[in-house]
Image (spheres, grey):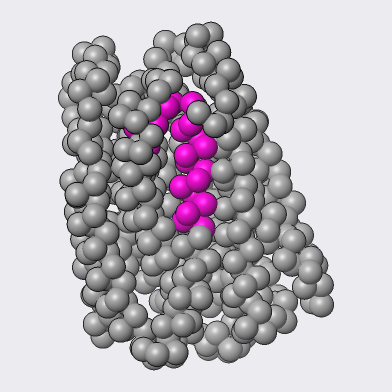
Amino acid sequence: MTTSSIPTIDLHNEYPAGRSKAWLAWSMPALFFLYEFMIRVSPGVIEGDLQTQFNVSTTQIGFSMSMYYYAYAPMQLVVGILLDRLGGRWPMAIAALICAGGCFLFAVAGGMNGLGSARFLMGFGSAFAYVGTVYVGSIWFPGRRIALLSGVTAALGMLGAVSAEALLGFLLEAVTWREAFNLFALVAVAIGILMWMLIPRNPTWYTDQVSHARDTHGCGILSGLACVMKNRQTWMLALVTALVYLPIGTFAALWGIRYLEVAMGFSSSASGPAVSMMFIGLGIVGPVIGWLSDRFHHRSMYLRMGTVVGLISSAGLLMIPMGMDWLVYVLLLLLGGSAGTVVVAFPLAMEHNPHHSRGTAMTFVNFTQMILAGFGQWLIGGLLDTGASTGNSMETLDGDDFKKAFLILPAALLVSVVVAWFLKDPQIDSQDQNAVLSTPLAD
């Protein structure tokens, strides 16, 4: 399937229902994504408490926590179909309630099976958050703002990740981790109600475009997925995105705090803020790259830049000796920033596929990204267990054990550098290109 034969994403040049309604429609799922990222990375804060309370190995902790991704990733393919068929209102509201159920189950879990099941439910509901937010935004915002909106949405997620440590730390001074997750459940219920009330139904002009695309490419429920799966550029894009995001899914979300404490000599109070530098880097780079991508309509080159920066910074993190704390902060900021380039992958996936499958295209990229993140959490936990000098206790691990386990990051990013070389931008009609280039940011 060639890109020239595929209609690009509709670059409507106005806010179809006005700016205020566009921002209101986007803000509710964006709030859900901020919340979702908080519960996604929360195990990194309480991982030590869980291991002590349940007396389990790092492999068991890694596997149970990775159940989030094993639900999140395959659900992406279903999420895309649901968004393309039903719009964002009902799917997003129900997803928040499922997250609430997962948080409640986590709070009452009596063992690793309960924790794993709770994380599975959290991942199931969270699967709708990011792509649903971008999907809703792509309907109610001008098409020239899609990558910027993707970047701003990602920045909100990073704000949630950074806030998770501080919020959980504050809560854990007053309540137990179980009570904290009960509070998370109540928040998810409130967000679900707000999304049901404030996300509008898909407009008639949009459903007409989708109907036209189905008439051209097939109207079966899996026709959109079939178009996506036949597109080689989408496959390469999904692989590159997954590899570039891997440091966030493994280092930042779970194992990074312990790595810094054991391998780099950081104190427990300094390791958390240091890991947060990755989220800050992603939060800064995402909107900037999104705006540049929309402004000049070059997307693939930013992903290529991200793979190179990620390779250099991840390798440097494993090579520097203890005592160079300032350099650790810089490398973590760069490593997170390299992951910020993935925000262009979602509009690029939409542009490479027919209009009726753009939700499915986004979720296929996210599927690959999250399944690899979940596998990476489990794999690193297993490598850490293998490297332990005695038993399965985290206390028996030394810096070399951690550095050997995290060699998978530069190895993965080296592969991403090679694959990213073959990524291409789709052809854009001159009229649409002029519309993108001629419109200022403040419209």
Residue 246: x and y in percent read 54, 54
User: What residue is shown at x 60% (from left), y 88% (from top)?
Assistant: 396
User: What residue is shown at x 53% (from left), y 66% (from top)?
Assistant: 162
**Quadrant of residue 72 in the image?**
bottom left
In reply to whether residue 145 is colored magenta, the answer given is yes
Q: Quick check: 22 left or right of 78?
A: right
Which residue is nearer to you in this view: 134 or 240? 134
Figure disc tally = 0
Taking 1 as reference, is 256 above or below it? below
Quarter of the rendering occupied by the N terminus: top left
SS assignment for the magenta stretch, majority: helix
Q: Quick check: 239 left or right of 171?
A: right
Q: Quick check: 429 left or right of 203?
A: right
In reply to whether residue 248 is colored magenta, the answer given is no
- Residue interval drawn in magenta: 137-158
Inspect this view and state whether residue 38 appears: yes
Which residue is nearer to you in this view: 395 or 392? 395
Residue 241: x and y in percent read 52, 43
Inspect this view and state whether residue 408 appears: no
Taking 157 as reference, is 265 above or below it? below
Which residue is nearer to you in this view: 345 or 312? 345
